[in-house]
Amino acid sequence: MKKVVKFGGSSLASAEQFQKVGKIIRQEEARRYVVPSAPGKRFPKDTKVTDMLYSCYHLAIQEKKFEAELAQIKARFQEIIDGLELSLSLEEEFKVIRENFSKKVGRDYAASRGEYLNGMIMAEYLGFEFIDAAEVIFFDENGNFDGAKTQSVLSERLAHTERAVIPGFYGMAADGRVKTFSRGGSDVTGSIVAKAVHADMYENWTDVSGFLIADPGVVKNPKAIDVITYRELRELSYMGASVLHEDAIFPVRKEGIPINIRNTNLPEDKGTLIVEATCRKPRFTITGIAGKKDFASITIEKAMMNAEVGFCMRVLDVFAKNNISIEHMPSGIDTMTILVHQDEFEEKEQKVLAGIHRAVEPDLVEMESDLALIAVVGRGMKSTRGTSGRIFSALAHANVNVRMIDQGSSELNIIIGVRNHDFNNAIKAIYDIFVTIQV
Ligand code: ASP
């Protein structure tokens, strides 16, 4: 059994957190490949080391003094080293970093040093081999992740390495310089490593016990999701639920490797298991609820619209030409509604309106703003009758007026449009009917 374990910044923010992580890794022989983030926040108002590195490098490129800022970063690492009673010295490393900052070798290089140094400390602490990610993770000439090259180099290297620490977030660009993924990218590294070693599991350790059924900012103490499929996760992430970097899914999904989101501070919690498919019955009919506010709707009405070939295409073309992406498009016999992001749409509104008039000569065009979309997602909905009935009676009881309904053809989700100000009440009502009352 082989597991890749990735630890997020808050799991590695201090020596105390490192000790928790060490305990978790030593608990299971299978936890052989470790991917650390840079030290994150120790307390809410603290600054992540990655952000400290970005600001420090910003001073360097402006040719301002950056010594004091770099010393603060060094102190963050030294505090961890001292707390763990390690004899590791980062003196030489910081000399090189200082020189490279003065030479302005790149913003990505600067940011990556958080993971690089944390990886060195982690390897020393665990007695694992340290592998610099710049030697095993590659990007191509266009700056995209080079999966083929990485797979061949990384899998070859790890085939000969029993236990290793590979820092997250960065790799090497085609020109030999250090390049990072986008923010939160250590999740992606973990997934790439899991693929390279054909891991049985990719454990992603963070500071929450997995995905929650609903946003805790809206529903008080929502329950966690125990098992979720990649497709369900995609629907929920699209609607704003976030724990994992989006790109972290692709490498492992192709290999059928499950991801387990776990909580470093509550290691007994089972967390959320993300799988390709499962025959395990979901605990509730719905897997999760997520939503976003601030959409605008454009409703177009025209008698006999359904008989007019190419009507939708011409309307959509107007949006495409104005570079506006469409979020949803419920339609009736003589009407179609298009939902777009309000901020993206507002300034182009009149141009779009004129375009629609020219393209399809509608009888009426109506617009509405301040709408919210809520996605109710669940593989269990397919086999359960009356799900939408229950959703809408719950919303009616909560006095929420439903503006739009769109059931995905996969029967995996139902999207509901409500007014922005009904957003929280709507989510609470749906959560209660499926989870609190557990019908
Ligand atoms: N340290 C990087 C960030 O703060 C990457 C990561 O933590 O995954 O975005």
Image (tube, helix red, strand yellow):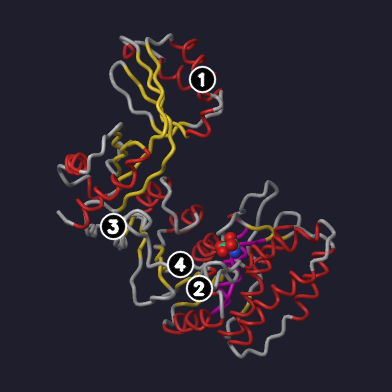
What is the CA distance from the residue labelled 4 to the residue labelled 3?
20 Å
The secondary element bearing badge 3 is classed as loop
One can see residue 411 in this view: yes
Give x and y (percent) for residue 127: 58, 86
Q: Is residue 409 above or below residue 332?
A: below
Which segment is the magenta one? 148-171
| Mark 4 and mark 2 residues within 8 Å of each other at the beta carbon | no
Query: Which badge, 2 or 3, comes first in the chain's sequence?
Result: 2
Q: Is residue 22 above or below residue 332?
A: below
Which residue has dot 2 on it?
11
Query: Which badge, 4 or 2, comes first in the chain's sequence?
Result: 2
The secondary element bearing badge 2 is classed as helix
Quadrant hosting ligand 1: bottom right
Q: Which mark is residue 352?
A: 1
Which residue has dot 3 on it?
278
Q: Nearer the viewer, mark 4 or mark 3?
A: 4
The secondary element bearing badge 4 is classed as strand
| Amino acid type, residue under disc 1 in the picture | Val
What is the CA distance from the residue labelled 2 to the residue labelled 1?
48 Å
